[in-house]
Amino acid sequence: MRTITLELEHIETVAALHIYLQYMLRLPAYYGRNLDALHDALGEIAQPTRLIVRAQGVKGETAAVLPRLLCVLEDAQQENPCLHVERA
């Protein structure tokens, strides 16, 4: 199983968040850098993947979008049996 730890506490803008997610999750170049595109991309994960989300102390724009991001991750987990999301 592939394990990816997302350390979000130092990311302050939504643009930086999506660049980070694209890099960490190895999303394709055509990734749309929005939550709908993230949901679609997570649905395409075909190998067992564990996402550990560390978001304590998040600030700036990222703090505002965090609840929606977590919803997207949890929804994708329910729809994709290869994806397991944990909050740390």
Image (cartoon, rainbow, N blue to C red):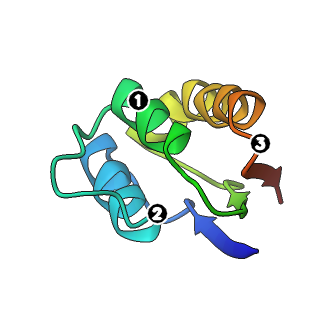
**Circle 2 crowding by C-alpha within 10 Å: few under 14, some 14–19, many from 20:** some
**Circle 1 crowding by C-alpha within 10 Å: few under 14, some 14–19, many from 20:** some
Q: Earlier in the sequence, mark 1 or mark 2?
A: 2
Q: Which residue is at the front of the view, 27 or 6?
A: 27
Residue 10 image position (x, y, % from top left): 48, 65
| SS at badge 1 | helix
User: Where is residue 57, by image quadrant?
Assistant: bottom right
| SS at badge 3 | loop
Q: Earlier in the sequence, mark 3 or mark 2?
A: 2
| SS at badge 2 | loop
- Using the numbered discs, state the Cα–Cα distance from disc 3 to disc 2 in whole angstroms: 17 Å
Residue 26 image position (x, y, % from top left): 39, 67
Residue type, label 3 = Pro
Is 75 situated above or below 8?
above
Is 52 situated above or below 39?
below
Res 35 label:
1
User: Can you tell which of label 1 and label 3 is closer to the viewer?
Assistant: 3
Q: Is residue 12 left or right of residue 47?
A: left
User: Can you tell which of label 3 and label 2 is closer to the viewer?
Assistant: 3
Res 25 label:
2
Instruction: Name the residue tied to disc 3.
Output: 81
Residue type, label 1 = Leu
